[in-house]
Image (spheres, grey):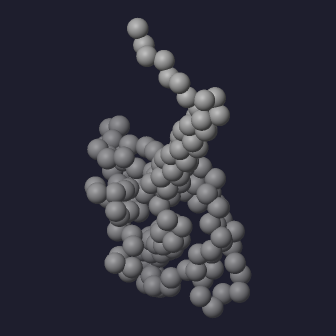
Amino acid sequence: MLPQLSLPVSAFKRVVRRLLQVLCVLSIVVSLTACNGSQPPRALLNEALAMQIQLTQSAIASSLDLTPMPIAPSVSRVRVEDQESFALGDEQGLRISGRFDWQLPGDRVQVDSPFELFLQRGSRGQSWRLARPKGGSDDRQAWLTYPLGLDKA
């Protein structure tokens, strides 16, 4: 037989209300932590996009037998439209796509472009690397990765 609680109804309502408030706060904190932990900071996305532009420019210059110009583009207004996890070799990667504005130094034209980034989170979850497909054999995609955030370390 269970003992009966002899709380007044108003005290019981206060306890239930307090428990609901605590549960709401905990669920908000957990959901915010989950969202923040899966996406890199905006500054890192800007850096990854600028690096991807520079790597693409270098690859084009190399294929045309031109000397690559080390010009860092200015990246702004990044709009993430889609984000999903994927297998990056034996690790987990993050595929992010959307649109962004960029501009070369000294150029008056600002370009609005779509983007697709492949990022790899560091083993301790404290760093990120830009991943670019390299090709591969059979069903296995090979990747080249480039560290991000080194200038802020």
Residue found at the very far top of the displayed protein: 1
Q: Nearer the viewer, residue 83 or 67?
A: 83
Name the residue at 43% across, 57% down: 119
Above or below: residue 116 compared with residue 105: above
Q: Look at the image and tell me in which quarter the N terminus lies.
A: top left
Name the residue at 47% across, 69% down: 44
Name the residue at 38% across, 80% down: 151
Q: Nearer the viewer, residue 28 or 148?
A: 28
Q: Quadrant of residue 127?
A: bottom left
User: What percent of the width, then of the height, locates residue 111?
Assistant: 68, 73
Above or below: residue 50 compared with residue 117: below
User: What percent of the width, then of the height, locates residue 129?
Assistant: 37, 63
Name the residue at 37% across, 51% down: 135
> Along the horizontal axis of the image, is 115 left or right of 48?
right
Q: Look at the image and tell me in which quarter the C terminus lies.
A: bottom left
Any part of residue 38 in sight = yes
How many numbered markers are drawn? 0
Any part of residue 63 in sight = no
User: What percent of the width, then of the height, locates residue 94?
Assistant: 45, 51
Q: Nearer the viewer, residue 39 or 91?
A: 39
User: What percent of the width, then of the height, locates residue 132?
Assistant: 41, 58
